[in-house]
Image: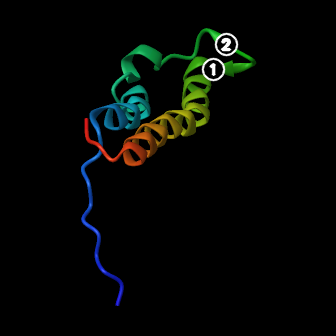
């Protein structure tokens, strides 16, 4: 039987990086809910959504790096 390891709470920095895409997609709708201007041949709202789909892995990678560094040093915030 494999011994259970206790789960650690994520650091504030990692949580903030994880919440950036969520906030950009959910709470900014009044800012980008329009068709004009057109960017790269797409309505602005489509461009905004596709941009954040591409940027989300970068934000989550930053959160992972914070947690990996925290785990390597063995400390908490």
Residue that lies at the very extreme toward the front in this rendered image: 73
Q: State the image quarter where residue 49 is shown.
A: top right
In three-dimensional space, the C-alpha distance between marks 2 and 1, rounded to whole angstroms, equals: 5 Å
Going by the image, does 1 lie left or right of 36? Answer: left
Say which residue appears at 47% left-offset and 17% top-offset.
Answer: 32
Say which residue appears at 55% left-offset and 23% top-offset.
Answer: 45
Quadrant for the C terminus, please. Answer: top left
Mark 2 element type: strand
**Label 2: few (<14), some or many (≥20) within 10 Å?**
few
Q: Which residue is mark 1?
A: 43
Going by the image, does 10 lie left or right of 31? Answer: left
Q: State the image quarter where residue 48 is shown.
A: top right
The foreground one among 23 and 41 is 23
Mark 1 element type: strand
Q: Position of residue 30 (x, y in %)?
A: 37, 18
Vertical position of residue 50 compared to residue 36: above or below: below
Say which residue appears at 33% left-offset and 31% top-offset.
Answer: 13
Quadrant for the N terminus, please. Answer: bottom left
Q: State the image quarter where residue 69 is shown.
A: top left
Q: Which residue is mark 2?
A: 38
């Amino acid at each position: 039987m494999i011994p259970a390891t206790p789960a650690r709470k994520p650091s504030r920095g990692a949580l903030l990086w994880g919440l950036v895409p969520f906030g950009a997609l959910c709470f900014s709708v009044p800012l980008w809910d329009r068709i004009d201007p057109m960017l790269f041949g797409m309505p602005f709202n489509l461009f905004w959504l596709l941009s954040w789909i591409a940027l989300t892995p970068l934000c989550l990678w930053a959160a992972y790096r914070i947690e990996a560094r925290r785990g390597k040093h063995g400390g908490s915030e």
